[in-house]
Amino acid sequence: MTDLRRSPLHDRHVALGAKMADFGGWSMPIEYPGGGVVAEHTAVRERVGLFDVSHLGKARVSGPGAADFVNACFTNDLRRIGPGRAQYTMCCTESGGVVDDLIQYLRADDDVFLIPNAANTAEVVRRLAAAAPEGVVVEDLHEGYGVLAVQGPRSDEVLRRLGLPTDHDYMSFVETTWDGLPVIVCRTGYTGERGYEIVPAWDVTASVWDALLEAVRAEGGLPAGLGARDTLRTEMGYPLHGNDLSLDITPVMAGAAWAVGWDKDTFWGKEALAAQRAAKDGRLMRGLVVTGRGIPRSHCEVRDASGAVVGEVTSGTFSPTRKQGIALALLDRSVTLGDEVVVDVRGRDVAATVTRPPFVEAGVRSS
């Protein structure tokens, strides 16, 4: 993994004995010793976990009219929120495919901070820079900031131990300081639990991590790797770009039409997406709960009772919370909620029921 980019916490993860792997071109921790994915997943659901997600991209669009410019590019409508709020959105091609899904932080009308996915940051920045009007500046700040995610029911207690703010609403952020250092604290996450994402400068991320990890352990929590992050997000039905969203899987197909500002005058891919939405054709994302024994994985074929192929798994895993296999799958529109289907798992038929995610109760808005 010598050619992979490294988080500012790489040495910390190695010292903790983490299993490292390539994730979007970055060497990142998948799990830590002492229980691995299941223990880390359970800690987040029941107490609290700390993730290093510094591989995520960071970018800034600034200058007169920056927010209006971003709004004319990405799917969601920034006019729905005000300064100090964050919003999930997508960067699409003109044909409606998803280049990336990302979080946009509205700082002001002339300042928007973006957190794209690691592997897609350069392309998102390239597309924005190519379209930016005079006076609007697009900066790739990928290694300008780290990102740490504190997730779980005891997240507030962890942040209070560091004197960080915890009383802001879901999908809002506060720019503050810790130990004299500027940090952004946003009530967002990718686990379905109450939590926060903390964005410090790259070169002080290690200091913030050390303090957070001490506080997390004091609350009975654990450091958590990207393995647990994946099982947690799958239980919530949250999409992963490259699996559940892609250049071939549009927001309409993925069940993410709620993150599209259909009434906006323009955004990249609007005409194609509006036509697809109106036509009501193409496969749709559904959930699958395995009723037999087996764990569905991406690209597993899905068949109906007659044996006809009706779709394909995009993400699948063992749910530590439910203790059974679950999956997201693109299915023909002829398949309805409650239908019984069969998933081909390595040549073995595994029975499953079609459902609507999430697979567990959401806790993101809990107090």
Image (spheres, grey):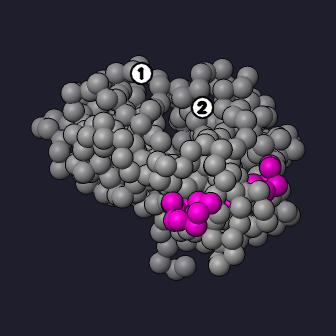
The x, y position of residue 324, in whole percent, is 78, 57
Q: In this view, does 100 lie above or below 19?
A: above
What span is in magenta? Answer: 302-324
The answer to whether mark 2 and mark 1 are in CB contact below 8 A is no
| Viewer can see residue 323 | yes
* Identity, as a three-letter code, of the amino acid under mark 1: Ile
Determine which residue is flagged by label 1: 81
Give the residue at x 52% y 80%.
2
Which secondary structure is most common in the magenta stretch?
strand
Pair 2/1: label in front: 1
Q: Residue furthest left?
A: 134
Q: Assign a secondary structure to mark 2.
A: loop
Observer-nearest residue: 288 or 86? Answer: 288
343 relative position to 54: left or right = right
Q: Residue at x 75, y 67 (%)?
A: 294
Q: Callout 2: 10 Å neighbours few (<14), some, many (20+)? A: many
Quarter placement of the N terminus = bottom right
**Whole-number angstrom distance, CA of label 2 to CA of label 1:** 15 Å
Residue at the disc numbered 2: 187
Give x and y (percent) for residue 15.
74, 68
Q: Nearer the viewer, residue 328 or 3?
A: 328
Nearer to me, 126 or 99: 99
Residue occupying image coordinates x 79% and y 34%: 154
How far across and down, in percent of the image, does residue 121 sit?
Answer: 38, 55
